[in-house]
Every structure is written in C-alpha cells, then in structure tokens.
Image (cartoon, rainbow, N blue to C red):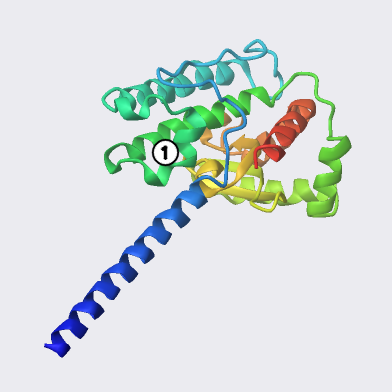
Amino acid sequence: MKNNIFSYMLLVLAIVGIAALVKSNVKAKKGNDMAVKPFLFQAWKYPFELPKLPYAYNALEPHIDTETMTIHHTKHHQGYVNNLNAALEKHADLQSMTIEELLINLNSLPAEVKTAIQNNGGGHFNHSMFWELLTPKSEGKPSGVLLEAINSAFGSFEAFQEEFNKAAKTRFGSGWAWLSLDASNKLVVTSSANQDCPLSDGLRPVLGLDVWEHAYYLQYQNRRPEYIAAWWSILNWAKIAENYDKALSAK
Ligand code: MN3
C-alpha cells in the first residue's frame, strides 16, 4: 500500500515536471519570436498591394535599365503579392497579421501556408524595401550615426562594402545580401537564399540587395559583380539611415 502511494506520488511529480518543461519551452519559443518587432510596413495587411515606385521606371538609368525595372516591379513583385494574397485567402486567422508579423512568426505558422508565405511574403517585403532604398540622386556614402555604427561594426565604410560585396557575389543561385541589426543591436552582413527574409532569423534588415538574375540579367547578363558595383552608386543613404533608426527603436 505504502509502495503504491509512493509510486503514485512519483508519477504526479513526473507529470508536473514534464508540464513545466513544456511550458518553459513554449515560453522560450514565444520569447524568441517576440525579439523582433515590426518597424517598417506596420499598416500593410491582407489583401496586400503592390506599392508604387518612388521614382520613374527609367530614373535609375544607366545603372539599372528601364525594362529590368518595369518587369521586376510589375511582373515579379506583383507576382509575389498575388501569390501571397492567394495563400492567405483561406486563412482568415492570418489575415489580420502585417507583412512583418507574418515573417517574424514564420516558424509558428501552419505548415500548409508556411512555404508560400516564406517565398511570397518574403518576396513582397524584400522588394518593397529594395525599391525604397534606391534613388537617381545618391549621396554616395552614409553619414552621421549610421556611418559611426558601420565604422564601429566593420572598421570602415570600405571594409563594410567589401564584406557586403563578398556576401552578394558568393550567394549561389538566387537570393539576397543584407545589412541588418542583430539581437545585440550590432550591424551584421548576411546573405539569404531565394526570398528568405532576415526578419525570420531574428534580424532587423536595414538594407538589402536583390541578386536574383531577374534583377540584372537583361543588362548585365552573367556579370553580377558589375551590377553590384552599379548598385552602390544609386543608394538612398538618407532612407537607409531612417531604416536604421526605426530598426534601433524596434527592440
Ligand atoms: Mn527580385
């Protein structure tokens, strides 16, 4: 009898212990998801729309040609928006989430829509950011607090460019190169495959470069390094600094 009570108590203790472990795991996962907060497109929800370019299709000539810009925006980006909306059409529970919330919480989304949101939600966010960071009237290089942060993270602007170029050139196949803030508010350079967004890895992107062939092939063919070099001369550093400020305050 005594033995039975003892076994029963052990069983209860084991159940309580397992329950506590499961709970702390769930908490840790939630905590991880909440480490990044939306900071850029906070009003953007289903049904998503293609944003207008902040300049004309021919504005970035000769660095990016008119035909590439037109197809990239009206066909590729529009395609991501359409496919994202189609994926969310039957998921009313996800329709109140913003584009950033979807990507930040990607790993908690239902398996049947996760890949569609990873590819098309990523495509929508990444391109929306990409267009805004280009301008025909570039300042040439960063200044102020952003330059100080770049210097502190990489040693110099030139060293940052070198690391970023390496990430962009060595990304095999389709993908992106990124400058993001990590969990400790330090600037880091990464690259991602396909349309994978740094938001899903707990990073806050402030600058992204599309190195899919559709971004440069009509003009540069296989010469990706030439496209990357041209891209540096059409960067809107005031806008990038604005992203950096917003990303900093999102933690
Ligand atoms: Mn693209």
Q: Position of residue 12 (x, y in %)?
A: 24, 72
**Amino acid, disc 1:** Gln
Q: How many marks?
A: 1
Q: Residues within 10 Å of mark 1 (few under 14, many from 20)?
A: many
Q: Ligand 1: does it lie within 8 Å of the C-beta at label 1?
A: no
Location of the N terminus (image quadrant)? bottom left
Q: In this view, does 171 lie to the left or right of 206?
A: left
Q: Which residue is drawn at 48% across and 27% down?
A: 98
Residue 127 visible in the shown view: yes
The residue lying furthest to the front in this view is 2
Q: Residue 40 versus residue 189: which sits nearer the camera?
A: 40
Q: In this view, does 80 lie above or below 146?
A: above
Q: Residue at x 43, y 22 (%)?
A: 81
Q: Residue at x 44, y 19 (%)?
A: 48
Residue position marked by numbered label 1 in the rendering: 118
Q: Residue 35 versus residue 181: which sits nearer the camera?
A: 35
The residue lying furthest to the left in this view is 1
Q: In this view, does 66 lie above or below 128?
A: above
Q: Which residue is drawn at 29% across and 43% down?
A: 111
Q: Position of residue 43 (x, y in %)?
A: 54, 20
Q: Is residue 136 left or right of residue 131?
A: right
Q: Residue 121 versus residue 21: which sits nearer the camera?
A: 21
Q: Where is residue 242 in the image (x, y as percent from the top left)?
A: 74, 29
Q: Position of residue 33 (x, y in %)?
A: 49, 47
Residue 214 visible in the shown view: no
Please tell me whether mark 1 sits on a helix, a strand or a loop. Answer: helix
Q: In this view, does 100 lie above or below 29?
A: above
Location of the C terminus (image quadrant)? top right
